[in-house]
Amino acid sequence: MLNTSDIYNDIRDAVAKLCADYPGEYWRKLDREMAYPTEFVQALTDAGWLAALIPEEYGGAGLPLSAGAAILEEIHKSGGNAGACHAQMYTMGTLLRHGSEEQKQKYLPGIADGSLRLQAFGVTEPTSGTDTGALKTTAKLDGKHYVVNGQKIWTSRAEHSDLMILLARTTPLSEGTKKTSGLSVLLVDMREAKDNGLKIRPIRTMMNHATTEVFFENLPVPGENLIGEEGKGFKYILSGMNSERILIASECIGDAKWLIEKAVNYAKERKVFGRSIGQNQGIQFPIAKAYANMRAAELMVQEALRVYEAGENPGAEANMAKMLAADASNEAANACTQTHGGFGFAEEYDIERKFRETRLYQVAPISTNLILSYLSEHILGMPRSY
Ligand SMILES: Cc1cc2nc3c(=O)[nH]c(=O)nc-3n(C[C@H](O)[C@H](O)[C@H](O)COP(=O)(O)OP(=O)(O)OC[C@H]3O[C@@H](n4cnc5c(N)ncnc54)[C@H](O)[C@@H]3O)c2cc1C
């Protein structure tokens, strides 16, 4: 019923088969303990799925973004969650697009075979928030090293990563220059950095997400770990955001499909007043509406993929896909919870877990308000609001 995409069926079937080994009980136990899905991530890595987007010459599968989207959607459609490892799939894009050939040769094959985990992406800071240009973490060149000082927040998976893509200020803000210039991207080897200027503190959140705060105190990072040109980091990070938004939108579509299917099945089987609750329009309509909105969002994800893969700028489509898909999964979570009555709140049904998980995507990796601001300004030509 909910197999609405007919491309990548082989990939979808193989991923679904792998996910079947990690059922609700697996995710529930991790959620209870706020633990990392190490076995699941290892299985995905061993099967090569997290290396799908890395070009073949660096040991990956060289598949297009739409294949990555199918993989992530399928994980979520199975009731699982790829948030623990999705960054391994796309964070390497910064290195791939802007790194030197030497850096690519050094890191990408290890990222492809999973011996090097590139899961951490340090952009957000506690005081600057969405206003990335106002970030305060600095990297000062001192001889052959940058010395990094500052703090990041919401650096997800930092405890489960060997490398971090870090955005830091290398040129102080001065009058007349754009806030977003003077930022640079460094590849931090966290294995060397721990206890040598890098501290990680986990943050417990409403869903199991392995996110952290990261503190830098005189952390030395070799100058050769600068990605691309100094001062152009903001542009490099922005260029990766479209793929991130499209892939996370695909996860939301997977969540929505899982939730809609659960709701439909329960609505058909649960009998109250001597008939199935799904016979009542008050139960049917919210599920049918969630389905319609999921399908509309899915079409926007496909459009964003089309534009991205045609080599054009998918800024508007990627943003709209992320917003509509996040709304669709949120709506499906609401409808599914309501359909289940009290059981929607019981841990063993996994619905309350998905309800919490889907809520995140109203805020991260970009909040709905900022997407609407982007559309207002860049697509509709209204004045910038911030
Ligand atoms: C679980 C989790 C994982 C994350 N993982 C990562 C990660 O791995 N790496 C990373 O760098 N970041 C990560 N983030 C950070 C995430 O990208 C930010 O939380 C998000 O971009 C919002 O920024 P903020 O939290 O600073 O909110 P703020 O910028 O403080 O905004 C607060 C609220 O105000 C609204 N707002 C702000 N400015 C405006 C405006 N001009 N107009 C209208 N509304 C406005 C926002 O929409 C938001 O609702 C993660 C966050 C979470 C919660």
Image: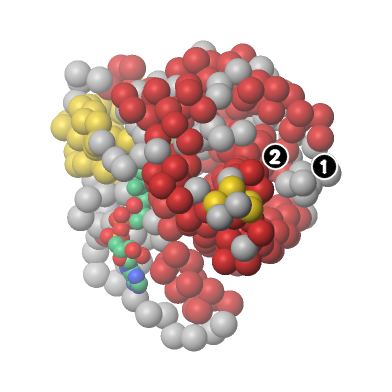
Tell me if 293 is positioned left or right of 228 in this view: right
C-alpha separation, residue under disc 1 versus residue under disc 2: 8 Å
Most distant residue in the bottom direction: 382
Under 8 Å from ligand 1: the CB of mark 2? no
Most distant residue in the left direction: 217
Residue 364 x %, y %: 41, 52
Residue on which the image places disc 2? 70
Callout 2: SS: helix
Q: At 27% across and 22% down in the image, what residue appears?
A: 193
Callout 1: SS: loop
Q: Is residue 129 visible?
A: yes
Which is nearer the eye, 289 or 256?
Answer: 289
Q: At 56% across and 21% down in the image, what residue appears?
A: 22
Q: At 63% across and 66% down in the image, what residue appears?
A: 281
Q: Identity of the amino acid at label 2?
A: Ala
Rendered view: 98 above or below 241: above
Q: Identity of the amino acid at label 1?
A: Ile
Q: Are marks 1 and 2 in contact (CB under 8 Å)?
A: yes
Ligand 1 picture quarter: bottom left
Q: At 69% across and 27% down in the image, what residue appears?
A: 15
Residue 71 x %, y %: 67, 35
